[in-house]
Image: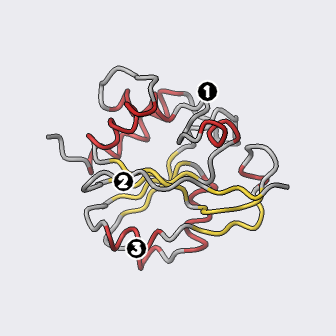
Amino acid sequence: MQKLTSFPPVLPKEPAVLILGSMPGVKSLEKQQYYGNPRNHFWNILFTLFNEPSVENYENKLAFCQKHRIALWDTIASCYRQGSLDANIRDAVPNDIPSLLKKYPSIKLIVCNGSKSYQLFVKYFKIAKISPVNVVKLPSTSPIPGRYTKTFHEKVEEWRIILRYIDKK
């Protein structure tokens, strides 16, 4: 099994929301892009939330995150995994999320994209120590069906919480 390493964080000047995946999937790692699998709902959910047209160019997607003060990272810094399934993650080493929060006190919400991201976040970090940052688990944007698979529109409704934390400028 190959050792996988996550990407560096995407950080706007004053991020308001930090979205944490677990570990990028195979397609994302190949492309070296957050949520690089075209079947993943992540980007479409974000563009829908902000009523903006979807873009294909990755640099434009990152500019969208900058504009809306959305930071991206993963709970896991490195791990071993066969394929893309979170269930196959072994020997996970967490990213230093507490240090990132100290450096960026503007972050008021951490969104864990799916159960694995949340489970590992809770395992490695005491949520009480993360306070006053709110931490929420939202439905995975992954194209892989899970136990609690929701429709695209159901996911959008649950992801709408991030709008409360982002100043419309």
Q: Quadrant of the C terminus?
A: top left
The crowding category of the residue bearing disc 3, from other C-alpha atoms within 10 Å (few below 14, some 14 to 19, many at least 20), is: some
- Neighbor class of circle 2 (other Cα within 10 Å; few <14, some 14-19, many 20+) is some
Q: Residue at x 79, y 44 (%)?
A: 83
Mark drawn on residue 130: 3
Q: Which residue is mark 2?
A: 11
> Viewer-nearest of labels 3 and 1?
1
Disc 3 and disc 2: Cα gap in Å? 18 Å
Position of residue 137 measured from the top left corner of the image (x, y, whole percent): 50, 54
N-term-proximal mark, 3 vs 1: 1
Q: Label 1, on which residue?
A: 39
Q: Are marks 1 and 2 in contact (CB under 8 Å)?
A: no
Q: Which mark is residue 79?
A: none
Give the answer, above or below, for where 107 lies relative to 51: below
Of labels 3 and 2, the one closer to you: 2
The answer to whether 5 is drawn above or below residue 129 in the figure is above
The amino acid marked with disc number 1 is Arg
Identify the amino acid type marked 2.
Leu
Answer with mark 3 or mark 2, whichever residue precedes in sequence.
2
Q: Are marks 3 and 2 in contact (CB under 8 Å)?
A: no
| Nearest to the observer: residue 81 or residue 136 | 81
